[in-house]
Amino acid sequence: MVKAQVYIYSNPFDGFPKPGDLTIIEEDLRPLLDGEYLAEAHYLSVDPYMRGYAPGFKVGTPLIGGQVALIRESKNPNFPEGKYCFGQFGWRSYTIANGVYDRSTAVNMQYVLPDFKGLSPSLGLGVLGMPGNTAYFGVEEICRPKVGDTVVITGAAGAVGSHVGQIAKLKGCNVIGITGSDDKGKWLCNELKFDSFINYKTQDFKKTLKQIAQDGVDCYFDNVGGEISSIIINQMNSFGKIAVCGSISAYNEKQAKASVIQGPVTLQQLRMEGFLVTRWNNRWGEGINKNLQWVQEGKIKYRETITDGFENMFQAFTDMLKGVNYGKSIVRVKSLIK
Ligand SMILES: NC(=O)c1ccc[n+]([C@@H]2O[C@H](COP(=O)([O-])OP(=O)(O)OC[C@H]3O[C@@H](n4cnc5c(N)ncnc54)[C@H](OP(=O)(O)O)[C@@H]3O)[C@@H](O)[C@H]2O)c1
């Protein structure tokens, strides 16, 4: 009999998540029924949305999340044994799944990974998965920057942000990344070819942005919300565009505050649009294929911050919320350590 380990949301997050808010339990898994398959988690994702959505979680339920899993056993021909799949299975070591997935909501999203041409299947959680598609569709469908535009990205050294900036560079834009450390900023400029960066933790943000973006900001890809976003929006050019992807600066706050932005939005006639990547569920493969092509051509670089051990998922999660990660934060199960 297979035993699964599962993280349970046992104590509601109050501010920053604390050890003890989650508990690991063991489940005995029953034999497979027709149409089902057994997925063994190899790489698990930790993402900001797991904190952002927490007010809606029920105490006593498993933590939500995506993973790349090896199909160990199968009674479903669409999910053959020995293949890797992506599954929105939660923080679990083993899962019995049935391949049924509602494309309109993305609940229970699951698919066999396409051929990654020899690249690690873990990329199915990052550059060749949900964050990669967020960057691809966010830039192509929401920002739509033009050659020469100045594009500002917050959360710039993370999974989504680092990818967005590189796509904007491919489109001939002047790209400014906002991040919380000089070392991350140097990585963005030296390796990913961003034009400049601002460390929002140490620099006079308003003044430095004015100096760097002398001709104003045309597009803003907003991953963080809060006061930093208000300052950027106040420095935007007429008919500028704002893609609202997330607001991580507020996820752990009980009462987040930021200056009013309706002034510049009206005066500069800005277009601000929020989006969920699941809007493009029916074009999911297009995003993965385009990102894979760019990676193979050396046009998009990626980085993974890997934590080893399923039992260290909470640590990986809080490290990501604190900004320890460069690129995509993932957890690798111990059996894969060489
Ligand atoms: N709309 C969608 O469909 C969608 C899909 C995926 C992700 N998202 C959103 O996109 C954003 C980025 O997600 P991701 O997966 O790529 O995460 P990520 O950027 O890889 O990791 C989170 C990063 O946020 C930064 N951060 C933490 N606290 C902050 C604060 N108070 N102010 C500013 N930055 C802070 C940290 O970097 P620093 O060291 O630079 O502070 C940290 O590394 C999140 O808001 C997420 O919710 C939205």
Image: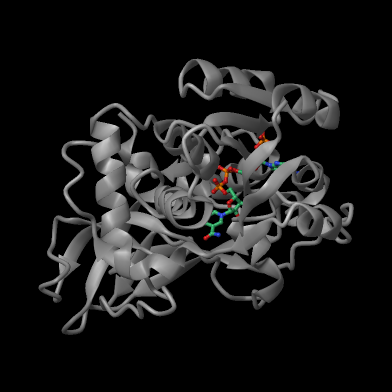
Image vertical order of residue 3 relative to residue 143, above or below: below
In the image, 58 versus 256, the foreground residue is 256
In the image, 327 versus 9, the foreground residue is 327
If the image is split into quadrants, where does the C terminus sit? top left
If the image is split into quadrants, where does the N terminus sit? bottom left
Image vertical order of residue 271 relative to residue 196, above or below: below
The part of the image, by quadrant, that contains residue 151 is top right
Give the colouring mode of the picture. Answer: one colour
Q: Position of residue 336 (x, y in %)?
A: 31, 38
Q: Position of residue 110 (x, y in %)?
A: 31, 68
Q: Where is residue 316 in the image (x, y as percent from the top left)?
A: 57, 43
User: Is 206 left or right of 97, judged from the image as shown?
Assistant: right
User: Is 252 left or right of 295, judged from the image as shown?
Assistant: right
Residue that appears at 46% across and 43% down? 330
Residue that appears at 52% across and 32% down? 148
Q: Can residue 41 be seen in this view?
A: yes
Residue that appears at 32% across and 61% down? 284
